[in-house]
Amino acid sequence: MTSAEKMQLLQGMFNGAQLTNVQVIGVVESGAKVVYQEHAAREAEGDGLSREALAKAASAVQQYMWGASAYAVLFCELRDHWGYANNMAEFEREIESIADELHLDYRCKAGTLSDAFRNNPYLEKPVERWREIGAKGRALHLLEQFREVLP
């Protein structure tokens, strides 16, 4: 099965939706199972945020963070405006690596974001709606500061 045929199969599964940033890992020829993985290819396309830019921005806002759960605010901005894959585990691994490398104040262990989302339902909504739905002031402040340091 060619890559184009695999992509057509996936689009059919998602009702013809235009799929971007998807890397097909494998398709069992019987059609019984399709394995795919979101792929952050936006940086290669000239969009998105590089790891270096993320590291610089995350480092710059440490003073506005109240704990590791504050990384959820950064994740939501990247998810909503920077084409970052909606994958919390991937973000946690990337930020944890950056935090280790730069000796940041807060680490981001596995499960940090899911805990933050569970305790703060506004995180599931687009960041533009946070103010109107009653997001915490500290989250709004961190979001503003993070936006200011992004390229």
Image (spheres, grey):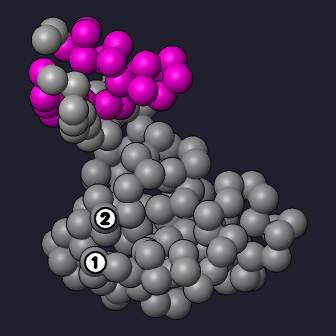
Write down the quadrant of residue 35 in the picture.
Answer: top left
Earlier-in-chain disc, 2 versus 1: 2
Residue 30 x, y percent position in the rendering: 15, 23
Give amino acid for label 2.
Ala
Q: Is residue 138 magenta?
A: no
Give amino acid for label 1.
Ala
Which one is nearer the viewer's eye here, 46 or 80? 80
Q: Name above or below for residue 148 compared with residue 72.
A: above
Residue at position x 59%, y 85% from top?
119
Residue at position x 42%, y 46% from top?
84
Q: Name the residue that disc number 2 marks.
A: 89
Could you tell me which quadrant the N terminus lies in? top left
Residue 24 x, y percent position in the rendering: 22, 29
Crowding at dot 1, Cα within 10 Å, few <14 / some 14-19 / many 20+, comes out as: some
Q: CA distance from mark 2 to mark 1?
A: 7 Å
Q: Is residue 20 magenta?
A: yes
Residue at position x 35%, y 31% from top?
21
Please state the extent of the stretch shown in magenta in the rendering. Answer: 3-29
Q: Is residue 52 visible?
A: yes
